[in-house]
Image (tube, rainbow, N blue to C red):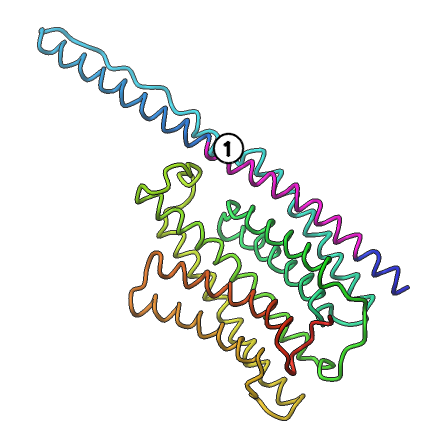
Amino acid sequence: MTETLVSYSLIAVYSAMAIYTFAFIMFAVDLARRSAESSDASAASATGLATASAQQSSVMQAASSGGTATLTASPASTGDAAIAHSPKSLRIAMALTVIAWVLHVSAVIFRGVAAGRVPWANMFEFTLTATALIVGVFLLVQFWQDLRFLGSFITGFALLALGVGTSSFYVDVVPLPPALQSAWLVIHVFVASLSTGFFALAAGLSVVQLMQSRREAGKALKLRFLDTLPAADRLETLAYRLTVVGFVMWTFTLIAGAVWAERAWGRYWGWDTKEVWTFIIWTIYAGYIHARATRGWRGSRSAWLAIVGFAAVIFNFTVVNLFFKGLHAYSGL
């Protein structure tokens, strides 16, 4: 029975990866569409200005000769109707993402039932669960703010992580080590994974913010799809709000980990590599929030801090787990 459920989990993972691939392609198509619409809008704007200038010249000539001239209104832009509803490519991309996410969550459930525990006790299981939560946060946030322009980033990241996880981190279902046989495994790791989802979105927004800042400064004129996205300051505000939510969860993760360490090893803090890097990540994001709130850090500096923070999260999961030894060495490899 266990082998059957593990097989179902792997089938669901590979199916999700295939659909994430198509979703990534459709999100990329949508970005290309945005670029094309931006180019058309720029051309239409230039034509409109030329027409308005010609009409004004006619009025002036008619007035100077004592005649009259009639101004005709230019037809409404056809782009307004397109903005009123989501384009087909974007709807298809979101539908594919939802289908892939359902399969992804099914893989997590099958793995958990096969193991008879929560499915995040080693690097493969954590990759499986964390990426499902990242995509889930992306889908959930759409009810608050339209961030579908990050679809390529999120689906691409999930696809890459699952590819590395299934090819390099996969291990068979094994019993939990004694230190992990605790309710804190459910609480600590789940909240850490959820906070990672918010940090990932904030990092994606910060990357777009940097590109948008260059665009607004006239240094990235070829990235025309940026014309259809929010301004850099708006992207920065959204990234900040998501980071604050993730930071609150990461703070709880740090505290819960200390409590769990006291229960398992009789001390709250032992300068283990994993503990140190968890605190480093907390410090980076605390510095980001503090600097932005009190020292007026805006623009590129805050964006880079958010990106560095997420890079530290990835480093903590990959390099620290694989190459550093300690009490938290639960990679399973």
Residue 167 relative to residue 243: left or right: right
* Residue at x 71% of width, y 70% of height: 122
* Residue 159, image x, y percentages: 65, 51
| On-image quarter of the N terminus | bottom right
Residue 94, compared with residue 298, is above or below; it is above
Q: Residue furthest front?
A: 323
User: Quadrant location of residue 194?
Assistant: bottom right
* Residue at x 63% of width, y 43% of height: 23
Residue 225, compared with residue 70, is above or below; it is below
Disc 1 residue type (three-letter): Arg
Residue 57 relative to residue 135: left or right: left
* Residue 120, image x, y percentages: 70, 69
Secondary element at image label 1: helix
Magenta residues? 10-35
| On-image quarter of the C terminus | bottom right
Q: Give the dominant element type of the magenta stretch: helix, strand or loop.
A: helix
Residue 161 among those drawn in magenta: no
How many labels were placed on the picture? 1
* Residue 124, image x, y percentages: 71, 64
The residue labelled by disc 1 is 33
Residue 34 among those drawn in magenta: yes
* Residue at x 55% of width, y 67% of height: 315
* Residue at x 39% of width, y 71% of height: 287
Q: Neighbour class for label 1 at 10 Å: few (<14), some, many (≥20)? A: some
* Residue 49, image x, y percentages: 27, 23
Nearer to me, 144 or 188: 188
